[in-house]
Amino acid sequence: MKKIGKDGLEWWEKKFEEIKADPLLWLFYDLNNSDKHSISSPLLRPRMNLYGYKGAAPPGLIISGEGVFQAVDRGTARERRIFFEGADAAFEVYLDIPELTDKGQNVSSIGLKSQLDLAIAHYEQLVFEARRNFDGGI
């Protein structure tokens, strides 16, 4: 935080509180920072199913609704999963949103693409404002 300075930090904290207070912006922030292992959003519903697997079974093989894989380089910065073919699995995520607002307006029925466009426009404006206030070049 030293790089942005006290004024920048105060500005960002204010803007972040605005994001938290806006249901649409907070939804996309939360979804971007959530995953199927630690879902903080009560609106995100994952569903995983493994129907079957036909293939090799080396030691350390993990068979789950995500598929069939082995973890390699475990405990290091290079840890990753190697997936095997032959799994009949499905992973789905759906949103359970009764009503969604943005800046006080109901945006529930405008469609996901339009909702994303609103969120992107907000972040574009944040970048423009940050550059204007702290970069001096705009």
Image: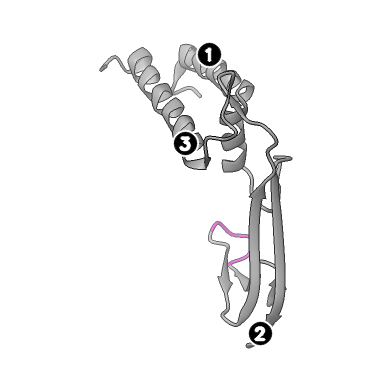
* Depth check, front residue: 101 or 75: 101
Task: Identify which residue is drawn at 37% across, 13% down.
Answer: 133
Q: Residue furthest right?
A: 42
- How many marks the image carries: the answer is 3
* Side (left or right) of 122 relative to 47: left
**Residue tagged 1:** 10
| Quadrant position of the C terminus in the picture | top left
Q: CA distance from mark 3 to mark 1?
A: 30 Å
| Chain part drawn in magenta | 73-77
In the rendered image, residue 5, in percent from the top left (x then y), is placed at 46, 16
**Residue tagged 3:** 114
- Given the image, on which type of amino acid does mark 2 rest? Pro
* Depth check, front residue: 121 or 133: 121
- Given the image, on which type of amino acid does mark 1 rest? Glu
Q: CA distance from mark 2 to mark 3?
A: 46 Å
Task: Identify which residue is drawn at 52% across, 40% down.
Answer: 111
SS for dot 3: helix
**Residue tagged 2:** 58
